[in-house]
Amino acid sequence: MLRKWVLVASLVGVTVLGGAGFTLALFTDSVQSGGQDFVAGTLALEGNRVDETLEGPIFYISNTDDGAAGDLPGARETGLWAPGDSHMREWQIENIGTLAARLTTIKATETSAIKGPNGEDLAEVLQVTVRDVHGNVLASGTLASFFEGKSLTPAVVLEPTDNLDLYITVELPLSTGNAYQGLKTVVTFTATAEQVKNNP
């Protein structure tokens, strides 16, 4: 009887040890979908002066100096400013991106200036008005107030390839005092836009 139990115990041990050496095989397969394209759209603006054949600033004192592009002169100089002067220039903004753009802000950045002895800045008195093609005022204030950026009211939506002509009038008021004689300001205007899609 003792011999039978030993034999049974030995068979169980062999079965357990033998099972540990086997792996369970499963059939597998995989499939791929075609190449997936994920491409981000672009938001890009381009600004040009209108009614001129040259690239360059929209306001300039001299056709042959700051209004020139290489050897070619500009065509619409303002000359030196005097109280009561007012000049309007067109600035065309085109959406050269692939997404619809909402034009929201116009900002002026003063890149150089000749200021008065008490810190007078010509930008403090120059009056700026931005209009659309229909004459609607989109933004206005002193040139200095544009340094922080002025919201366009209402904002303007440009679809891809659309362009917008902004009419910018700058005026030196007749009431400008002697403290502003000989002063100078040079600014760069910047138009800012944001995407329309997913941005109500």
Image (spheres, rainbow, N blue to C red):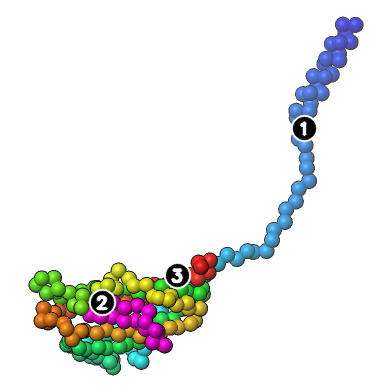
- Mark nearest the camera among 2 and 3 is 2
Nearer to the camera, 180 or 194? 180
User: Which mark is on residue 22?
Assistant: 1
Q: Quadrant of residue 56?
A: bottom left
User: Which mark is on residue 87?
Assistant: none
Q: Is residue 24 left or right of residue 168?
A: right
Residue 49: x and y, percent? 35, 86
At numbered mark 1, what does the secondary structure look like: helix, strand or loop?
loop
> Against 103, is 74 above or below?
below
At numbered mark 3, what does the secondary structure look like: helix, strand or loop?
strand
Q: Quadrant of residue 88?
A: bottom left
> Against 78, is 115 above or below?
above
Residue 192: x and y, percent? 39, 72
Residue at (45% x, 77% y) in the render: 156
Residue at (15% x, 75% y) in the render: 114
Labelled pair 1, 3 in contact (Cβ < 8 Å): no
Is residue 192 at all visible to an observer of this figure? yes
* Chain-order first, disc 2 or disc 1: 1
**Circle 2 residues within 10 Å: few <14, some 14–19, many ≥20:** some
Q: Residue furthest bottom?
A: 75
Q: Which residue is mark 3?
A: 194
Range shown magenta: 126-141
